[in-house]
Image (cartoon, grey):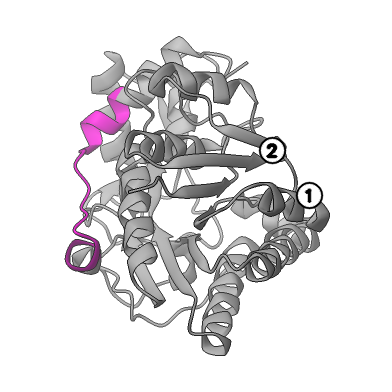
């Protein structure tokens, strides 16, 4: 059987790079596309270090339609995994138009170019933010959707656009993967999360406290209706998440239609649970301060993972201790990020 070729947009990013590794290890040809706005080309060398091969790379922006056309003209692409997009919730509230242009106009460009090239198989990187503040947990795929910030809205609009694309043409195969909270890093310590500036997300923030770059962890609120009062989230190891994409792309290449699938562990961990797991990983006590709740934060959010198990035969393998251990290993090896 000849190798299938997968285009990974945002291929040098955090989840994109881990997915490139997983695809290559599963025997796919990989083409990575990235504008390097939030990542570094060195990542490609690190992928080679892990897999023995450097993926073909295009430095192109999804807003550059001609750039996208060139990629499809020069390669036979069987499916696309679409990660490219801005992803900071707080920033999206400050600069919504930038988010709408990049995450929606850029994606529409991609879908149009795919359609023209006859490539109608896509795995889209969506998010649990599309559930807004859920009425109950665990969250199932058929729960009502609503969003509380522009970032979440761009994910939801993309889901709707792709559903409409399928309605207009039943040749499409669309997988809408709703991720919960990806953390951790590749076991090798070569790939991991490198946020620009001060991290917005919990684990990269804890990592900076652990390596002395930040003074203490800010805990936003301890008066939620949760076991210890702090917010509860479903944290998933980025390698598990990458493997979920392999299962999704395999399914998409064999089935037409639209599927919405949660990728999470199905377990909720509180902010303090994660902090204590990280303390175990790095072998020291980490200081924290309780602050007032942040606007827009919800008490708890974790996935019902039955659909991913049944449809894709996929489930998360790693626990919170392994996630924190791998994150700390990456932090130790790359205290100043990937250069």
Please say if 133 is above or below 212: below
Circles 2 and 1: CB distance less than 8 Å?
A: yes
**Residue beneath disc 2:** 58
| Residue 160 in the image: above or below residue 189 | below
Residue occupying the point 77% across, 62% down: 101
Expressed as whole percent of the image width and height from the top left, the position of residue 124 reads 50, 61
- Which residues fall within the magenta stretch? 308-325
Identify the residue at image location x=65%, y=26%: 40
Does residue 312 belong to the magenta stretch? yes
Q: Name the residue located 19 percent from the left edge and 67 percent from the top edge.
A: 306
Q: Per the image, is 224 magenta?
A: no
Instruction: Please state the horizontal and vertical placement of residue 55, each as a whole percent of the image.
Output: 54, 31
The residue to which callout 1 is attached is 67
Residue 278 image-quadrant placement: top left
The CA distance from mark 2 to mark 1 is 9 Å
Q: Secondary structure at mark 2?
A: strand
Can residue 57 be seen here? The reply is yes
Hey, which quadrant is residue 52 in on the image? top left
Residue found farthest to the bottom:
168
């Amino acid at each position: 059987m000849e190798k299938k070729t997968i285009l990974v947009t945002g291929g040098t990013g955090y989840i994109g790079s881990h997915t490139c590794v997983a695809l290559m290890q599963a025997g796919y040809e990989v083409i990575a596309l990235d504008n390097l706005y939030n990542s570094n080309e060195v990542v490609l060398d690190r992928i080679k270090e892990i897999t023995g091969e450097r993926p073909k790379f295009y430095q192109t922006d999804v807003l550059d339609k001609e750039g996208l056309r060139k990629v499809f003209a020069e390669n036979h692409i069987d499916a696309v995994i679409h990660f490219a997009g801005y992803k900071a919730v707080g920033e999206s509230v400050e600069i919504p138009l930038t988010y709408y242009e990049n995450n929606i106009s850029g994606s529409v460009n991609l879908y149009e170019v795919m359609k023209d090239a006859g490539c109608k198989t896509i795995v889209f990187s969506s998010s649990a933010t599309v559930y807004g503040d859920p009425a109950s947990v665990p969250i199932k795929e058929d729960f009502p959707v609503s969003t509380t910030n522009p970032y979440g809205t761009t994910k939801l609009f993309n889901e709707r656009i792709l559903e409409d694309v399928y309605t207009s043409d039943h040749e499409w195969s669309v997988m809408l993967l709703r991720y919960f909270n990806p953390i951790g890093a590749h076991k090798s310590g070569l790939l991991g999360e490198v946020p620009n500036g001060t991290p917005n997300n919990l684990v990269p923030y804890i990592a900076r406290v652990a390596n002395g770059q930040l003074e203490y962890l800010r805990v936003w609120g301890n008066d939620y209706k949760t076991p210890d009062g702090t917010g509860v989230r479903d944290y998933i190891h980025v390698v598990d998440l990458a493997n979920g994409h392999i299962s999704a792309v395999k399914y998409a290449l064999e089935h037409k239609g639209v599927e919405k699938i949660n990728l999470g562990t199905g377990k909720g961990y509180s902010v303090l649970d994660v902090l204590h797991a990280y303390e175990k990983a790095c072998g020291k006590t980490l200081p924290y301060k309780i602050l007032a709740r942040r606007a827009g934060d919800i008490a708890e959010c974790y996935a019902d993972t039955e659909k991913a198990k049944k449809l894709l035969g996929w489930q998360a393998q790693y626990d919170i201790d392994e996630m924190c251990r791998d994150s700390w290993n990456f932090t130790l090896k790359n205290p100043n990020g990937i250069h």
